[in-house]
Amino acid sequence: MYYRCYICHKPPRGFCWLDPNRFQSSENRRASFKRFCSKTCQDIHYQLHRKGVDVNSVSPAHPCSRDISASRHVTDLEQKAAESVLAPLADYVMAVGMEKDLGSYSKDEIIGLVDTVLESYHCTLQELYKDEVPF
């Protein structure tokens, strides 16, 4: 089985979380088990969990909605992080070439595009949440 960080979807590195509610069935407790790539992502999950926000809940009616806040519960900081990706994404597209459409990108260019977006989002999200982490 292949697992990903519950927050940023990077490979996990030993940080985990399990709902401590002892009155749940063992099946529900197993379902609450989350893996994380870092203490920062674990802390982000904890803060969101305390606020009642499920990070990866997606509306089944609109899984590919263009409006990010319509498809899942998005905090203001997550929305800011998503918007902050636009500048690095534009820089990358400019470096590849504006005349080139997405369908003609090579595999390496697509991987670079995805890496640019994910890295920018992840770093911005960690920077925005650093003041909300309790320790």
Image (tube, rainbow, N blue to C red):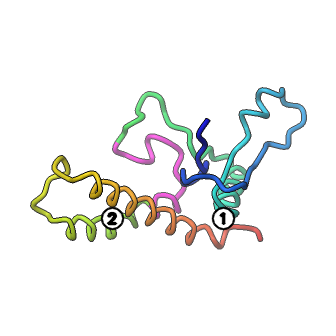
Label 1, label 2: how far apart the Cα atoms are: 23 Å
Q: Please give the residue where the numbered disc 1 appears in the rendered image.
A: 40
* Circle count: 2
* Main secondary structure of the magenta stretch: helix
Residue depicted at 75% across the width and 49% down the height: 17
Residue 128 percent location from the top left of the image: 56, 69
**Residue sitting nearer the eye, 126 or 48:** 126
Q: Which residue is mark 2?
A: 86
Q: Position of residue 99 (x, y in %)?
A: 9, 61
Describe residue 19's horizontal placement relative to residue 99 as left or right. Answer: right
* Residue plotted at (27% across, 71% down): 91
Spot the residue most to the left: 99
Identify residue type, mark 1: Thr
Which segment is the magenta one?
66-81
Tell me, yes or no, whether the highlighted magenta stretch contains residue 67. yes
Q: Residue at x 37, y 46 (%)?
A: 67
Where 56 falls versus 77 (above or below)? above
Of all residues, the one furthest to the right in this rendering is: 22
32 left or right of 87?
right
Q: Which mark is residue 26?
A: none
Image coordinates for residue 18, horizontal then vertical, percent? 78, 44
Counting from the top left corner in percent of width and height, residue 133 is at: 70, 67
Judging from the image, what secondary structure is the residue with disc 2 in? helix
